[in-house]
Amino acid sequence: MHYNMVNYTLYYFTQHMTLDEMIENWSIRDHGHLKPNNISWDDYFMDVARVVWEKCTCDRWKCWCVIVRDYDIISSWFANAPEWSDTCDKAGHQMISMTNDKWEIEEHCMRNNCAEQNAIASAARIWIPLEWATMYVTMTPCTIRHCAHMIVACGIKRVVCDKRYQHWQESEEIFKRAWIELVYLNDGVVEY
C-alpha cells in the first residue's frame, strides 16, 4: 500500500516539477539510484516527507510530517493554516513575540499549524490510531506549540528528524521520559 501511495505522490508532484528540479530544490535526495528497494526505510519515508514539503504555505520555514506504521503511510501533512483560514502566502504572516527558555524574545508565525499537529489531526479526523507509529519530520518537534507533547499523548513511539530544531533540548528530554526513540538523519541545527 505505501509504495502505491508514494508513486501517486511522486506522480502528482512531478506534474509540476521534473525529478531533477525536485532533487535540486531539496524535495527529495538522490541516493545514487532513486530505487526504493536500495535505500533504508528511514531515507525512503524522509524522501516522501520532502515531497509533502512542497505544499507548505509559510515561507519562514517549510515543515513536513509523514506518519508511518508497519511500513504504511497512515497520515501526512505540512505546515499550513487550518481549513478555511487564510494562509501566509495569501494573507501574510501572523507574527507574535514569545520568550524562549533562555529568556530571549523570538518571533513566531502563528497563522499556520505545525506539520506535526496537522498530521495528527488528519489521522484523528478519520479515526486512525497512532499508537506505535513512526513520525518523519523536518526537525525536532517543538514544545512552543506543544507538538512534542501531542506526539507523546497520541502514542507515537519513534520520531525521525532530518535535523535538530534550534530549541531541541526540551523536546529531547520529553521524548526520553516517554521512552520515544528520537533519530536524526543529518547533523546541523535549523534556526529561523
Image (spheres, grey):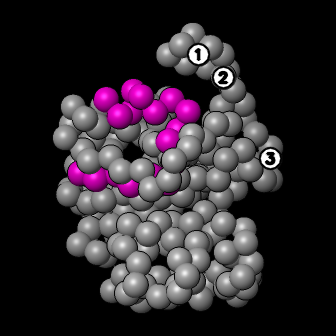
Q: Amino acid at mark 1?
A: Thr
Q: Is residue 154 left or right of residue 11?
A: left
Packing grade of label 3 (10 A; few <14, some 14-19, many >=20) is few
Residue under label 1, please give it.
99
Q: Secondary structure at mark 2?
A: strand
Q: Amino acid at mark 3?
A: Ala
* Residue at 70 percent of width and 50 percent of height: 58
Q: Amino acid at mark 2?
A: Glu
Please say if 32 is above or below 83.
below
* Residue at 23 percent of width and 72 percent of height: 70
Q: Position of residue 78 (x, y in %)?
A: 56, 58
Q: Position of residue 132 (x, y in %)?
A: 20, 57
Residue under label 3, please give it.
91
Are discs 1 and 2 less than 8 Å apart at CB? yes
**On-image quarter of the N terminus:** bottom left
Please say if 79 is above or below 35.
above
In the image, 183 versus 146, the foreground residue is: 183
Which span of residues is magenta-colored? 157-173
